[in-house]
Amino acid sequence: MKNFKILFMIIIFAISISCAPSLMRTTYIVEEGSLFAGQAIRDLDLENRYDVNILRIKREGKLITNPSPEIVLQTKDTLYLFGNSNSIVQIEKIFK
């Protein structure tokens, strides 16, 4: 019986890992005409809508770590995104 419980726990763990969404980090450059340009991070609401976070912003050669929600994104900003890979792909399609 003890072996059965251990085997059952291993199977449940394996299923939970295989069903978990894959996470990824990527960069996104805010281009002219992008829906990101001119928007505050708070207004985009990426974390709640897409489960994606902006970890850093590279602007004019300087890194902004853990950016404030009030920061307004500018053309040529490089965003360092982290989140569900499917959501990141969706964001890249929507905001280009």
Image (cartoon, rainbow, N blue to C red):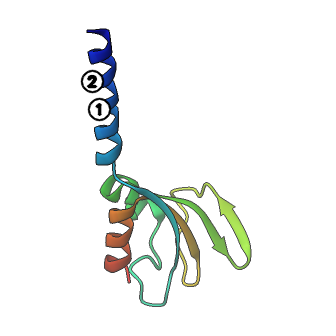
Q: Residue visible at 61% across and 54% down?
A: 66
**Quarter-wise, where is residue 44 in the image?**
bottom left
Q: Position of residue 61 (x, y in %)?
A: 74, 77
User: Are the residues flagged by discs 2 and 1 in contact, CB closer than 8 Å?
Assistant: yes
| In this view, 56 is above or below 91 | above
**Quarter-wise, where is residue 27 in the image?**
bottom right
Type of amino acid under label 1? Ile
**Quarter-wise, where is residue 23 in the image?**
bottom left
Residue that carries the numbered disc 2 in the rendered image: 8
Between 1 and 66, which is closer to the camera in this rendering?
1
| In this view, 52 is above or below 10 | below
Quarter holding the N terminus is: top left
Q: Position of residue 25 (x, y in %)?
A: 52, 63
What is the secondary structure assignment of the residue under circle 1? helix
Residue that carries the numbered disc 1 in the rendered image: 11
Quarter holding the C terminus is: bottom left
